[in-house]
Amino acid sequence: MTKAEIVAKIAEKTGVEKGSTQAVIESFMEIVKESVKNNEDVYLRGFGSFKSKMRKEKVGRNIRANGGKGEKIVIPAHNIPAFKPAKSFINDLK
C-alpha cells in the first residue's frame, strides 16, 4: 500500500479532505523521523514503537575489488531506525 492509498482510505473513513489528511500524515512521518534521529523512542499503544538502534562495527567485503574476490573493509558502527510491533498488533495478524 502506498502513502497515496493510505491518504485516500483515511480521508474516506474520516470524511476529511485528502489534502488535509496528507498534511497530517506527512507531519506525523516527519515527527517520527526527527524523534528517532534524536534517539527518542516513539510509542504508539496498540500499534508499536519506533526506535534508533546501534549497529556494531563489523568487517565486510568490497566485492568490486580484486576482480570479484573482494577486500576486507571496516563498516563503522552506526544507528539504524527500527520498528517493533505491539503484542496486540502481532496477535491481530494471527
Image: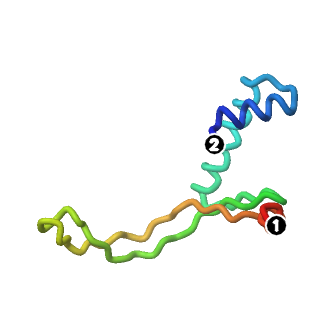
Q: Is residue 76 left or right of residue 11?
A: left
As drawn, the label of residue 30 is 2
Q: Position of residue 90 (x, y in %)?
A: 77, 65
| Residue in view at x 87 percent, y 31 percent | 14
**Identity of the residue furthest to the front in this view:** 94
**Identity of the residue furthest to the left in this view:** 67
Which numbered disc flags the more N-terminal residue, 1 or 2? 2
Local secondary structure at mark 2: helix
Q: Amino acid at mark 2?
A: Glu
Contact check, label 1 and label 2, Cβ < 8 Å:
no
Q: Position of residue 11 (x, y in %)?
A: 80, 29
Q: Amino acid at mark 1?
A: Asn
How dense is the environment of label 2, judged by Cα within 10 Å: few (below 14), some, or many (20 and up)? few
The quadrant of the image that shows the C terminus is bottom right
Local secondary structure at mark 1: helix
As drawn, the label of residue 91 is 1
Marks 1 and 2: which is nearer the front? 1
| Residue in view at x 17 percent, y 72 percent | 69
